[in-house]
Image: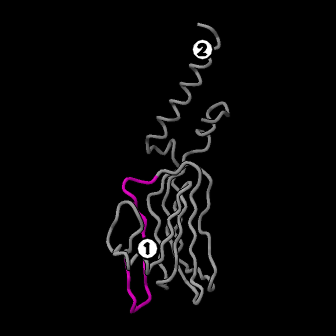
Amino acid sequence: MSERIIEELRKLNRTLERLLAYSTVSPDYWEVKLIDVDTPISIAPRGSKVVVDEQEVGRVFAIVASVNNKDAVVEVQIDDTIARNSIQGLYNAGMTSFNPSTFWLAKYDEANDSYVAAYTPVPWRDYHRRVKVTVYAPSNSAVSFTYLIYRYRFREQLLRGKHGSGW
């Protein structure tokens, strides 16, 4: 075989190794990224807060926001897809129990101004370029919230390959 063919086969083998690693959940290939913020964050009326914005390859297992305002909006961008939901909008749409593919309300308590929106995809949601989560306050009132984001990040060196080349 020519050297050119041998080199192309080596490149193909490296790519296949990375694809196999991607299909596992081994800690050799994946880094757990857990953000659990229990101290409330405040947003002024018409304001917003980006809680995560990462350009990486990974998997989302859970995004949970606990807010004190039913008009608050949670926006999640995964690659080129954006889901934007208000607590009240989820309630009006009947999203009040577990849903494996989109946002749902784990809690809706108007008497105590306590609301919990969750995105818990089954199976996990892969992303290949970006994950971004933003919380917005409505125009007429502030929002206080806590949140949890549980995701895996594919280890950077595997994206570049052993020799620094990409996929």
Left/right placement of residue 163 relative to residue 95 reads right
View extreme (left): residue = 97
Other-residue count near label 2 (Cα within 10 Å), few / some / many at <14 / 14–19 / ≥20: few
Q: Quadrant of the C terminus?
A: top right
Q: Which residue is mark 2?
A: 6
User: Element type at marker 2?
Assistant: helix
Q: Quadrant of the rendered structure where residue 54 is?
A: bottom right
Residue 119 counted in the magenta span: yes
Residue nearer the viewer, 111 or 34:
111
Position above or below: 135 against 142: above
Looking at the picture, how far across and down is residue 166, in whole percent?
Answer: 63, 36
Left/right placement of residue 46 relative to residue 88 reads right
Residue 68 counted in the magenta span: no
Range shown magenta: 107-125
Q: Quadrant of the rendered structure where residue 155 is?
A: top right
Looking at the picture, how far across and down is residue 58, in whole percent?
Answer: 52, 50
